[in-house]
């Protein structure tokens, strides 16, 4: 009864997340859908992207062929398929990991901890790559673990093929999963050397299976860009590291009157003129501080949903507390599980330790690949299934020890838990205080409350400002809608439309004192590049608004900008400015590459 009951609970939680979360298909999700539509219209050869791999758009293309192109239908079908794949992976993982640990009752408990995990279920509703990649990585690791009972050579070979194929598919779904490939291969190599239960042909055949998912990507890149690369053509990891140094964390808002981008400032942000190498060598304190903040930000589930509709949801603290308890339990479980168990055969202990070390290494690799870069909550998703077994071991050992533990040990355990949860809560509150947008939303200076205040009718006649009225002096607050370019040619003109919405309290005037316009500027990403363009690159390029813009209203302008004269990487920053006042904190920006013209 445990398995069917767990499935019912999982479906209930996932359905609640689908209905309550009301997650839109925007930004990255919309990009995947558009690529899928191109595949449907033009076949597999129509896929071409320098920033995304083919696997997830191909999956969506299959969905679209079945249910049609209506976004609501596509999202619903994706939700059903992703939920089913999660439950299937939870079942496979529970059987394989339970068999590797050799502990009574652990397998079913692992299934419960994985299948009913609210964070995994909440992400099943997203048209994004995190959950499918997590499922594939979890299955790849689970299939790689040696079992307490002997397995036939042909069975082991088949498991190696399936595990490494899953690892390769995970990379094609989400390129950051590449870090898991050496982990999975390493598990098989060490298993063959230590336990000697892997036939010699399993590894070469498995490596062939690992390589197969990369072939379509190589062909796509060769056809579209003339580069036979097995991954994306553009190197985004360095760009994400640059952004990561600037922010402690990022997220996406879908709140009326607020910008989409939510950024938590990094208190250890190094000087922008330093390169990544210079930061590591010259300011290791800032580098290590940034890694520490990113690690906590990665694990802190202050917002469980990818697209945030409410800055203070009722489930914020229950879910984040559950997540913090999970990670504490996983740490305890790893320590306890690696200790020698009395009366257990050495072979059983060795396989158990091997399984826990493999799961721990896989989890650490996930942390290692994301912590130096731009961090979001959803990037921590693979940690939940990978650490479910250590968490179950901790809960099992604690439940057995509590009835016989003395008062002093119980008090010590309760104190440790209270310190862990209290410290995590304090850090989470502090981290949110580093996000000016959250502070402004809670104060009501932007967002729905601010809009409601602006449109509230005023009793009696409204006096005319008259010629002697004081000029507006508010630093503009704005939200933006724009598709900023990724690549530019040095010294060449580029044009794009920007829609700006007045999220402040005062009218944006075009004439008179303190006029408002929309400006763009380039910021060099290295000291050397900054010195080369100093004095030869325009500091700011702007365009006037077509008319006055009242609070809550929008206007669209066409920005024409001249790219910097020196090739390199820059941040293109667009923001609303008011003459005579400091720059606005609300901006839209993107890392761009400037290349030499032909």
Image (cartoon, grey):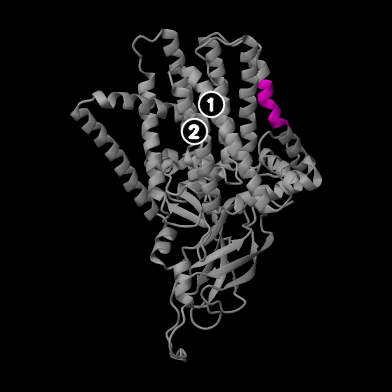
Q: Position of residue 206 (x, y in %)?
A: 65, 19
Which residue is identified by label 2? 114
Which residue is identified by label 1? 93
Residue at image point 65% right, 32% down? 169
Which image quadrant is residue 446 in? bottom left
Residue at image point 37% right, 29% down? 331
Q: Main secondary structure of the magenta part?
A: helix
Asked if the residue at tag 2 contacts the one at tag 1, i.e. Cβ–Cβ closer than 8 Å, the answer is yes
Tell me: residue 78, above or below residue 356.
below
The residue range painted magenta reads 207-215
Residue 212, magenta (yes or no): yes
Residue at image point 36% right, 34% down? 328
Between 128 and 391, the one lying in front of the other is 391
Residue 315, magenta (yes or no): no
Q: Residue furthest right?
A: 42
Task: Give SS at disc 2.
Answer: helix
Task: Give SS at disc 1.
Answer: helix
Is residue 347 among what the camera can see? yes
Q: Position of residue 576 (x, y in %)?
A: 53, 68
């Amino acid at each position: 009864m445990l398995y069917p009951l767990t499935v019912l609970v999982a479906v209930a939680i996932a359905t609640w997340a689908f209905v309550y979360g009301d997650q839109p298909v925007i930004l990255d999700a919309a990009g995947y859908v558009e690529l899928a539509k191109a595949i449907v219209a033009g076949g597999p050869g129509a896929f071409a992207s320098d920033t995304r791999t083919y696997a997830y758009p191909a999956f969506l293309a299959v969905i679209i062929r079945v249910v049609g192109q209506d976004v609501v239908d596509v999202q619903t079908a994706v939700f059903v398929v992703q939920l089913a794949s999660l439950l299937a992976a939870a079942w496979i993982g529970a059987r394989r990991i339970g068999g590797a640990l050799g502990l009574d009752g652990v397998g079913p408990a692992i299934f419960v901890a994985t299948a009913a995990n609210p964070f995994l279920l909440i992400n099943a509703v997203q048209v994004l790559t995190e959950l499918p990649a997590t499922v594939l990585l979890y299955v790849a690791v689970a299939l790689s673990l040696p079992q307490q009972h002997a397995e036939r050579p042909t069975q082991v070979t088949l498991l190696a093929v399936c595990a490494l194929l899953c690892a390769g598919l995970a990379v094609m779904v989400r390129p950051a999963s590449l870090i898991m490939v050496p982990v999975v291969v390493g598990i098989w190599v060490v298993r063959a050397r230590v336990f000697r239960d892997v036939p010699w042909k399993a590894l070469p055949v498995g490596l062939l299976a690992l390589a197969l998912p990369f072939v379509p990507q190589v062909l796509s890149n060769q056809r579209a860009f003339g580069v036979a690369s097995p991954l994306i053509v553009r190197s985004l990891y360095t760009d994400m590291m640059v952004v990561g140094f600037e922010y402690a964390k990022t997220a996406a808002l879908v709140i009326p009157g607020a910008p989409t981008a939510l950024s938590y400032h990094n208190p250890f942000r190094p000087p922008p003129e330093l390169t990544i190498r210079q930061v590591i060598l010259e300011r290791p304190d800032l580098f290590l501080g940034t890694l520490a903040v990113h690690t906590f930000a990665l694990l802190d589930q202050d917002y469980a949903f990818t697209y945030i509709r409410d800055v203070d949801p009722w489930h914020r603290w229950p879910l984040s507390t559950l997540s913090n308890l999970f990670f504490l339990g996983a740490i305890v479980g790893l320590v306890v599980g690696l200790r020698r168990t009395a009366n257990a055969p050495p072979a059983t202990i060795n396989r158990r330790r091997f399984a826990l070390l493999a799961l721990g290494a896989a989890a650490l690799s996930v942390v290692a690949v994301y912590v130096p870069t731009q961090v979001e909550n959803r990037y921590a998703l693979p940690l939940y299934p990978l650490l479910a077994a250590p968490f179950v071991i901790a809960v099992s050992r604690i439940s057995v020890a509590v009835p016989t533990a003395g008062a002093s040990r119980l008090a010590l355990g309760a104190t440790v838990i209270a310190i862990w949860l209290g410290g995590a809560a304090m850090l989470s509150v502090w981290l949110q205080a580093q996000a000016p947008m959250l502070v402004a939303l809670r104060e009501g200076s932007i967002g729905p409350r601010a809009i409601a205040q602006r449109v509230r009718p005023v009793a009696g006649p409204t006096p005319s400002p008259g010629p002697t009225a004081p000029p507006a002096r508010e630093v503009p607050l704005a939200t933006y809608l724009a598709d900023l370019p990724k690549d530019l040619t040095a010294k060449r003109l580029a044009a794009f439309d920007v829609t700006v919405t007045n999220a402040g309290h005062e009218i944006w005037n075009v004439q008179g004192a303190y006029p408002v316009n929309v400006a763009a500027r380039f910021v060099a990403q290295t000291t050397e590049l900054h010195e080369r363009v100093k004095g030869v690159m325009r500091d700011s390029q702007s365009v006037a608004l077509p008319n006055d813009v009242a609070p809550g209203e929008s206007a669209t302008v066409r920005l024409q900008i001249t790219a910097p004269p020196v090739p390199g990487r820059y941040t293109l920053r667009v923001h609303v400015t008011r003459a005579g006042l400091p720059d606005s904190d609300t901006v839209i920006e993107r890392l761009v590459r400037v290349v030499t013209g032909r």
